[in-house]
Image (tube, helix red, strand yellow):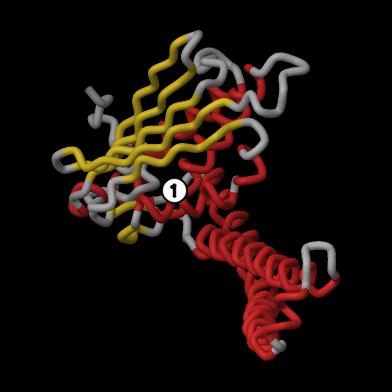
Amino acid sequence: MTRGDARRRPHPAQALEARKFAAIGQLASGIAHEINTPTQYIGDNLRFLLDAFRQLAALLPADAVERADESSELAYLLEEIPNAVAQSLDGVTHVGRMVAAVRLFATARVGEIVMVNLNDAVESVLTLAHNEWKYVAQVQRDLDPTLPLVPCAEAEVRQVILSLVLDAARAIAAASPAGAPATALGTIVVTTRLDDHCVTLRLSDTGIADTTGTTERARALAVTRERVVAQRGAVRIASTARQGTTVIVQLPLRSDVVLERPIIASAVGRAAGSIA
């Protein structure tokens, strides 16, 4: 076996992780499909009911509507039924976004290089992790709409973004003093930009800036760096005790750079260095 062949063999731990991710992904994809079908029926029926109610309301005699004051049952129904249906449609739409986000995560294959819309990946991760950050932070998006597709391992990149969002939310939660009001939310800012032959993802938070040593966040950031460097990318971390943490991830746009060596090879990306 040549040295190059040996380098192409996945590490046992990586192979196990890939199999576990594939199994979970297959189950999640099936569950997402089962949820999506009835959700579509519910949404279609709610839209039908809303349209039918408006048609029926339009058939009411004009004088009956005019005589209905704010305290009457008719006035109440005319106002509240459309509101209730509209709120239900909002809920169905949110479920649909969650299902779509789960599907994207579930169908991404570990180690497979594809062209990825990084902005869509960010949005799907924020949707998927909404329950983790909505109680502790406000999320501000500054996503470049002209960003080109990025050749990368989609599963790993989505995991990187998810890890960064979860770490930021937990750091903000840890920074909140006991008994702080629910309105005192922290801030997570997600930015994407095109920089020469790379795309840059920047995630800043106002949480505890404990990113070194053996803390949980430090270990998670180390894994993030490993995954990004494996794709010939680079990671830089800037933290300030009173201002939180900014993690900058840079991925190359040239597919020949990404594909030059297998993504599982530990030597890949060692020369990438850090972002200036």
Residue 273 shows up from this direction:
yes
Mark 1 crowd level (few <14, some 14–19, many ≥20, 10 Å Cα): many
Q: Nearer the viewer, residue 216 or 141?
A: 141
> Considering the image in quadrants, where does the C terminus appear?
top left
Q: Report the residue marked by disc 1.
A: 122
Location of residue 15 with respect to 185 vertically, above or below: below
**x, y (%) of residue 51?**
62, 83
Q: Residue furthest top?
A: 241
Residue drawn 72% across and 18% down? Answer: 180
Circle 1 — which element?
A: helix
Residue drawn 54% across and 59% down? Answer: 101
Report which quarter residue 176 is drawn in. Answer: top right
**x, y (%) of residue 187?**
52, 28
Residue 1 shows up from this direction:
no
The amino acid type of the residue labelled 1 equals Val
- Left or right: residue 3 compared with residue 51: left
**x, y (%) of residue 110?**
47, 55
- Left or right: residue 195 compared with residue 122: left
Q: Residue furthest bottom?
A: 59
